[in-house]
Amino acid sequence: MKFHPAYLSLLALLAPSEASSHFYLMEPTPILTQDERGNPQKAEPCGGTKSGSTPATGVVTPVKGGARFHIKIKETVYHPGHYRIALAGQPIDLPADPETVTRETEKGPRSVSAKIDPNPKPPVLADGLFVHTERFEPGHIWETDIRIPNIDCENCTLQVIQWMADHSFNPEGGYTYHHCAELKITADPAMPRDQGWLKK
């Protein structure tokens, strides 16, 4: 999807809310265990807690390079915003959370808009996904297929994040919630290799 970065400036006016959002990563299996709401998910880059006490799932998902790959998300607590998907050889190489414009309130800063790249480049696979401003019942499902670059990567980190409008700042993750999955990508020899996805 392609959206002008300014569109999100209307989100806070269209759907003001005090609730914190939550999402549950259904596919692929995340690297950390989640409760029914997808917690813990505030800490960047992959959720969990800053103390690192969240149990790992131990799941590594095999993927063929150059193939379409299914992403399935359950938004367990509504909040206006959008999603972004990125891929890196290790978590430290994942991109920073979206650049956010805020407004000051009596209770501190709240998010107004976020920069979306209409032509994402490595390490971002897709940006501005599932933009929503109208309230829905908890448990809404978002799904899409993305192309995995044709590379060899034994332990790649796929990151799915949700950026939220009209949200207060949280010290662990700003205005963004996070989940990651571990992928084992095997390049398709019949296709050309994609460049720029793995740092040397």
Image (cartoon, rainbow, N blue to C red):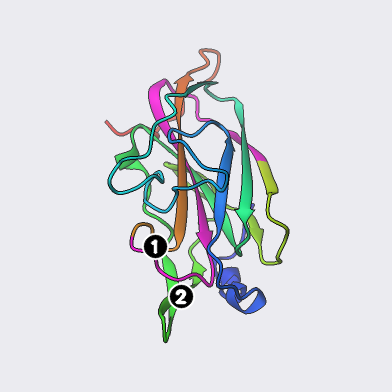
Q: Nearer the viewer, residue 114 or 197?
A: 114
Q: Residue at x 55, y 54 (%)?
A: 22
Q: Residue 38: say if magenta.
A: no
Picture quadrant where residue 102 is located? bottom left
Where is residue 166 shown, x and y percent of the image? 53, 72
- Is 44 situated above or below 199? below
Disc 1 crowd rating (10 Å Cα; few below 14, some 14-19, many 20+) is many
List x then y, in percent, for residue 60: 46, 23
Residue name at image x 66 percent, y 76 percent: 14
Which residue is rendered at x = 73% and y = 58% of the image? 137
- Type of residue at label 2? Arg
Q: Which quarter of the rendering shows the C terminus?
A: top left
Mark found first going from the N terminus, 2 or 1: 2
Q: Which residues are magenta?
A: 144-171
The vertical placement of 200 against 172, above or below, is above
How far apart are the two marked residues, 2 and 1, measured between alpha carbons? 10 Å
- Local secondary structure at mark 1: loop
Under tag 2, what secondary structure?
strand
> How far across and down, in percent of the image, does residue 38 sit?
53, 46
Task: Check disc 1 and report the residue beneath it.
Answer: 174
For the residues bearing labels 2 and 1, Cβ distance under 8 angstroms:
no
For the point 46% across and 36% down, the residue is 33
Which numbered circle lies on residue 11? none
The amino acid beneath tag 1 is: Gly
- Neighbours of disc 2 within 10 Å: few (<14), some (14-19), many (20+): many
Outermost top residue: 189
Q: Which residue is mark 2?
A: 110
